[in-house]
Image (tube, rainbow, N blue to C red):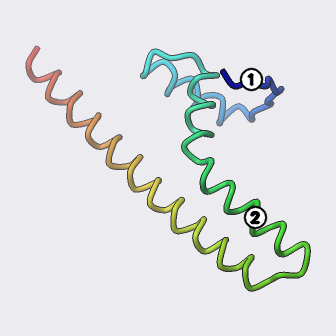
Amino acid sequence: MARTKRIALALPDEADQVLTEIAEALNKPKTTIVTEIFLEALPTLKSISQALIAAKTGAADPALQALAVALKDAGFKLDQVQSDLFALQREQKKGSKDV
């Protein structure tokens, strides 16, 4: 099993409130939510990392290409999250009508 690392994370009040609400809604610990979000974003973050490294070393064209791919991927993932949230909202409304 891969070793996991612990990090200290400080969040502004607003971010902590949103994280708390998500954790309570999903009945999961905050740390699990943060880990899941980060792992979902990992491919995009890798592309951004590669773009930043390329830009730092002077390879601007590959950096811009990698950044464009990362942003496209991030947009797709946000669309997926939005669809999931709308589906959850519809299920909750349907469940409240059945009661």
Q: Picture coordinates of residue 37 (x, y %)?
A: 57, 38
Q: Please give left or right for residue 76 compared with residue 66 in the image.
A: left
Taking the spot 29% from the left edge, 43% from the top edge, the residue there is 86
Q: Picture coordinates of residue 32 (x, y %)?
A: 58, 23
Which quadrant holds residue 97?
top left
- Precedes in sequence: disc 1 or disc 2: 1
Taking the spot 14% from the left edge, 29% from the top edge, the residue there is 94
Amino acid type of the residue tagged 2 in the rendering:
Gln
Q: Please give left or right for residue 7 compared with residue 36 in the image.
A: right
Return the residue nearer the eye: 74 or 88. Answer: 74
Taking the spot 60% from the left edge, 28% from the top edge, the residue there is 17
Which quadrant holds residue 12?
top right
Q: Which residue is mark 2?
A: 50
Q: Picture coordinates of residue 67 (x, y %)?
A: 66, 71
- How far apart are the alpha carbons under marks 1 and 2? 24 Å
Q: Secondary structure at mark 1?
A: loop
Q: Counting other residues with Cα less than 10 Å from the Cα at mark 1, is it few (<14), some (14-19), or many (20 or more)? A: few
Q: Which residue is mark 1?
A: 3
